[in-house]
Image (cartoon, grey):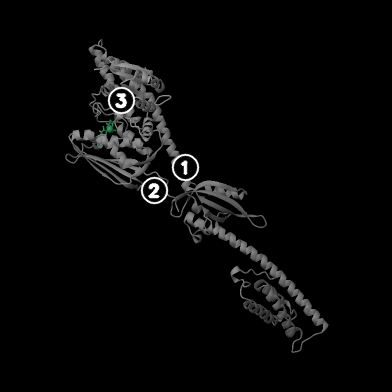
């Protein structure tokens, strides 16, 4: 039987009736011509059957009856009774009836087949449309991992067009740090297993990484042989970023709670000892030596108190990070030093940009600013200029994070190059009596906790000496999802 | 000058006791309590000139007790002090309800505490007659 598959676009059964009858006539004519070829001479009906079947498939049932009649006339005229006369013997009529019924049978079979095929093609087209328009990336691959289909969602997710992806190996999407991920999936498939909601990382055409959840199922042919796999992948980068942010937030809060309970345990005994030493000094029976020992004890106690305040800062919060205005926080840290600045004849210049908001622990950030301002004031015993700047900024080095930059600069003594590398070490101080050397160390750890960084530039050249501390604090909002 | 009467409230007995003793040295009558509840029970009977109170205590917090005391006796001076970090949160909460409090941080030097109490404070910039707790 003729089983030519006609793509939907070439099907004419939905076209105008005269076109269908014209095509039917064409088929019969072709059959007629073919019948004149030498091998067909003694089988005069063969090609007419073909013409009827084709007509039924392509043009529908009506034209196929028409082509049956046309074929019968043509066969009778040209082959059974060549010449001009018409034969009407009983045998002729029987032969014609037989021919016509075979034709009709063929026509109806062909018509049915074509209907079923059309329905399945419609179905396939609908499925293909669903796959194409899906937001998820849907692709199929052979058992060797060669990509055989690639929808629009896959184009969006991975950045490769269909033309670029077809025929390539799926390892194209695998980041170098996960070399075993795709082989693992493929080997699972080969053993007939499915992979459900596997969360992993893939690499886009532009090199950025995306977090995806992927489900892979085996594809079988009609005979049940495993021939490949279909993959559905969904971008979960946004969700991952949100989860990560939450984890960090909880970590921050946990550190805060720890600091709170340690502060309580330390500050209460410190208060008691401070009070006891005070009472001891009031004791008139204390001799000169005892008084000397006592004042040492008080000095040392003061140091412990200062360390406690630096590390377990009074303002440290237990609560979780909130949106804070960095400029306002710096301003409030500065306000505490107004008297000191005036007393030292230090001019403060400030330059705030508006909208410098970040997600952070306000109390801790204030402590950082307070430490840096205090250091600058200490460095300018005979006056100078303190410059404070807050501006929106980017961290170019690290995935271009958005954030806020704070610059605290002074025209003080400067820091000798040999000492610059030790600045952020705990207990490094040049202020023997008053400093703990914890200010910068604590500041750095707070800034790092907020995923920012702190930098310093300093000069000790006479007349041009001074120090610039620069703090970058990221906005720490979930990065926008890669489109 | 009239003798001052002061209530000292702290859940750590050593802290409360040593402060009471320091006050005694200065000739100030002090009464010690280890909880905000106990202090509130005695507050109207003692009718103190000032209260020195810890912020973080089991049961009612120092800030809640201070709000109640201020309601009962607006002229009583309340000096809060705290060694704990959650103070900032408690203060924020009080502020959101319209109560402003200044808090001294532990460890606080007895000299500073006395200066606050007796009103001749020269370090904090608090004008005489005006108490940290009432400033906003
Ligand atoms: N702006 C500055 N100008 C000059 N030197 C500085 C400046 N900032 C820091 N330093 C130097 O770095 C040292 C360490 O500073 P850090 O803040 O860590 O401790 P500290 O100020 O000595 O003590 P603390 O801050 O605990 O009271 C200081 O002793 C000082 O020598
Ligand atoms: Mg310092």
SS for callout 1: helix
Q: Which residue carries the number 2 mark?
A: A399
Q: Is residue A451 visible?
A: no
Mark 2 vs mark 3: same chain? no
Q: Position of residue A261 (x, y in %)?
A: 40, 27
Image quadrant of ligand 1? top left
The residue under the point 62% across, 69% down is A6
Q: Which mark is residue B75?
A: 3
What chain does badge 3 belong to? B
Mark 1 and 2 residues: CB-CB less than 8 Å, in contact?
A: no
The residue under the point 29% across, 37% down is A332
SS for callout 2: loop
Mark 3 vs mark 1: same chain? no
The answer to which quarter of the image holds residue A309 is: top left
Q: Earlier in the sequence, mark 1 or mark 2?
A: 1
The residue under the point 61% across, 50% down is A190
Disc 1 from disc 2: Cα separation = 19 Å
Quarter of the picture containing the C terminus of chain A is bottom left
What chain does badge 2 belong to? A
* Badge 1 density bin: few <14, some 14–19, many ≥20, Cα 10 Å: few
Disc 3 from disc 1: Cα separation = 51 Å
* Of the pair A363 and A481, the residue shown nearer to us: A363
Which residue, as the protein is rendered here, is positioned at the far right?
A90
Q: Is residue A178 rendered to the left or right of residue A217?
A: left
Location of residue A203 with respect to A257 vertically, above or below: below
Location of residue A375 with respect to A228 vertically, above or below: above
Q: Which residue carries the number 1 mark?
A: A243
Q: Which mark's residue is nearer the viewer, 1 or 2?
A: 1
What chain does badge 1 belong to? A
């Amino acid at each position: 039987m003729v089983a030519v598959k006609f793509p939907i676009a070439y099907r004419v059964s939905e076209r105008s009736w005269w076109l269908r009858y014209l095509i039917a006539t064409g088929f019969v004519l072709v059959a007629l011509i073919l019948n004149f070829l030498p091998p067909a001479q003694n089988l005069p009906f063969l090609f007419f059957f073909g013409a009827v079947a084709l007509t039924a498939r392509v043009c529908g049932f009506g034209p196929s009856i028409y082509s049956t009649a046309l074929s019968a006339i043509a066969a009778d005229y040209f082959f059974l009774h060549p010449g001009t006369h018409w034969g009407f013997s009983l045998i002729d009529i029987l032969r014609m009836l037989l021919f016509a019924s075979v034709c009709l049978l063929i026509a109806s079979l062909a018509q049915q087949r074509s209907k079923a095929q059309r329905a399945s093609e419609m179905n396939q087209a609908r499925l293909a449309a669903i796959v194409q328009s899906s937001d998820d990336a849907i692709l199929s691959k052979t058992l060797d991992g060669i990509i055989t289909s690639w929808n629009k969602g896959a184009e969006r997710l991975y950045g490769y067009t269909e033309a670029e992806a077809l025929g390539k190996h799926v390892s194209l999407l695998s980041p170098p740090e996960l070399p075993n991920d795709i082989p693992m999936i493929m080997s699972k498939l080969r053993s007939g297993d499915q992979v459900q909601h596997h969360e992993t990382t893939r690499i886009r055409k532009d090199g950025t990484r995306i977090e995806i959840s992927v489900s892979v199922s085996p594809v079988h042919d009609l005979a049940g042989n495993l021939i490949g796999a279909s993959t559905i992948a969904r971008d979960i980068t946004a969700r991952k970023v949100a989860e990560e942010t939450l984890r960090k937030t909880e970590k921050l809060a946990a550190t805060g709670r720890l600091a709170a309970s340690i502060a309580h345990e330390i500050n209460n005994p410190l208060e008691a000892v401070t009070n006891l030493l005070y009472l001891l000094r009031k004791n008139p029976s204390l001799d000169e030596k005892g008084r000397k020992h006592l004042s040492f004890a008080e000095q040392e106690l003061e140091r412990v108190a200062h360390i406690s305040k630096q590390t377990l800062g009074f303002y440290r919060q237990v609560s979780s990070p909130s949106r804070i205005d960095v400029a306002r926080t710096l301003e409030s840290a500065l306000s505490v030093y107004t008297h000191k600045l005036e007393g030292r004849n230090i001019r403060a210049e400030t330059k705030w940009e508006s909208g410098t908001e970040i997600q952070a622990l306000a109390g801790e950030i204030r402590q950082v600013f307070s430490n840096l301002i205090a250091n600058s004031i200490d460095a300018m015993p005979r006056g100078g200029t303190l410059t404070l700047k807050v501006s929106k900024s980017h961290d170019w080095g690290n995935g271009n994070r958005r954030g806020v930059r704070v610059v605290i600069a002074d025209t003080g003594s400067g820091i000798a190059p040999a000492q610059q590398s030790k600045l952020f070490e705990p207990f490094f101080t040049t202020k023997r009596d008053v400093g703990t050397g914890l200010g910068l160390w604590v500041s750095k750890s707070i800034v790092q906790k907020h995923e920012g960084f702190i930098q310093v530039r300093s000069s000790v050249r006479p007349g041009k000496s001074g120090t610039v501390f620069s703090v970058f604090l990221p906005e720490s909002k979930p990065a926008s999802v890669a489109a | 000058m009239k003798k001052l009467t002061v209530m000292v409230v702290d859940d750590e007995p050593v802290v409360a006791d040593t402060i009471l003793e320091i006050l005694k040295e200065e000739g100030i009558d002090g009464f010690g309590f280890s909880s905000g509840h106990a202090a509130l029970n005695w507050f109207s009977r003692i009718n103190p000139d000032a209260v020195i109170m810890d912020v973080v205590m089991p049961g009612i917090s120092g800030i809640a007790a201070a709000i109640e005391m201020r309601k009962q006796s607006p002229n009583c001076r309340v000096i809060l002090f705290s060694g704990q970090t959650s103070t900032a949160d408690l203060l924020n909460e009080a502020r959101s309800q319209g109560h402003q409090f200044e808090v001294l941080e532990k460890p606080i030097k007895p000299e500073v505490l006395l200066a606050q109490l007796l009103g001749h404070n020269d370090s904090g910039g608090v004008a005489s007659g005006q108490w940290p707790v009432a400033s906003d």
